[in-house]
Image: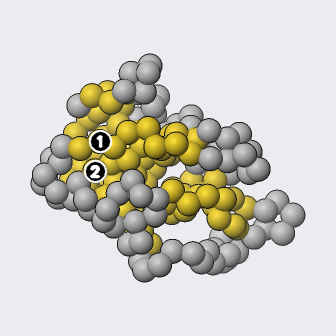
């Protein structure tokens, strides 16, 4: 089956380094050189994508990768500043969509290249240029411990 381009998303300044669909497929997050996370939604009537919110000021260098938790409530972003930011979604629909910064995980010696939740959402893995993988335990109060 051939692929067909349905949309081009504009908004980031500079390179876009990563994208991730939410578990339900309703939201798309993108990250890049401009140090922001854009959360996009698709208009069901027109099919066009639009920016629903911009998450910024949590990281000081390029954001390289992002991923949604399996439940779709959390969004993790790995940055060249050596951190991984965890955002929590606090809206249920496009009209009330918002996020709150819940944690900034530190520990890698330098750039964090990627981040991933396990299928149950109880663990988070980060990997960095320092050639290490850190596994973070997420407790019921959303506290993170390596």
Q: Which disc number belongs to residue 83?
A: 2
Q: Which residue lies furthest to the right in this view?
A: 45
Give neighbour class at mark 1: few <14, some 14-19, many 20+ (Cα, 10 Å): some
Q: Position of residue 107 (x, y in %)?
A: 18, 43
Looking at the rendered structure, the secondary structure element under dot 1 is strand
Q: Residue at horizontal 47%, vertical 78%?
A: 13
Foreground residue, 1 or 63? Answer: 63
Q: Which quarter shows the N terminus?
A: bottom right
Q: In the orientation shown, which residue stands out farthest toward the front?
A: 57
Q: In this view, does 59 lie to the left or right of 8?
A: left
In this view, 72 is above or below 67: above
| Residue at 46 percent of width and 28 percent of height | 120
Q: Which of marks 2 and 1 is nearer the N terminus?
A: 2
Task: Confirm whether residue 94 shows in the render.
Answer: yes
Q: Which residue is drawn at 57% across and 53% down?
A: 21
Q: Could you tell me how many numbered marks the image carries?
A: 2
User: In terms of secondary structure, where does tag 2 sit?
Assistant: strand
- The circle drawn on residue 88 is none
30 with respect to 9 (left or right)? left
Protein image colouring: secondary structure
How far separated are the C-alphas under marks 2 and 1? 5 Å
Residue 26: percent from left, percent from top: 68, 51
Q: In which quarter of the image is the C terminus?
A: top left
User: 146 left or right of 35?
Assistant: left
Q: Are marks 2 and 1 in contact (CB under 8 Å)?
A: yes
Report crowding for label 2: few under 14, some 14 to 19, many 20 or more residues within 10 A (C-alpha): many
Up-down relation of residue 126 to residue 59 (above or below) = above
The percent coordinates of residue 109 (x first, y second) are 13, 52
The residue singled out by tag 1 in the image is: 105
Residue sitting at 66 percent across and 59 percent down?
52
């Amino acid at each position: 089956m051939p692929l067909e381009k349905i949309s081009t998303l504009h908004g980031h300044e500079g390179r876009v380094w990563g994208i991730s669909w939410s578990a339900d497929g309703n939201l798309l997050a993108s990250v890049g050189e401009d140090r922001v996370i854009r959360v996009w939604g698709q208009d069901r009537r027109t099919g066009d994508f639009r920016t629903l919110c911009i998450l910024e000021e949590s990281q000081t260098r390029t954001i390289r990768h992002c991923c949604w938790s399996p439940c779709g409530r959390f969004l993790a972003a790995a940055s060249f500043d050596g951190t991984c930011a965890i955002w929590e979604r606090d809206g249920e629909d496009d009209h009330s969509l918002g996020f709150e910064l819940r944690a900034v995980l530190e520990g890698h010696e330098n750039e964090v290249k990627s981040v991933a939740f396990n299928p149950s959402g109880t663990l988070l893995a980060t990997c960095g240029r320092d050639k290490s993988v850190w596994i973070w335990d997420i407790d019921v109060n959303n506290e993170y411990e390596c």
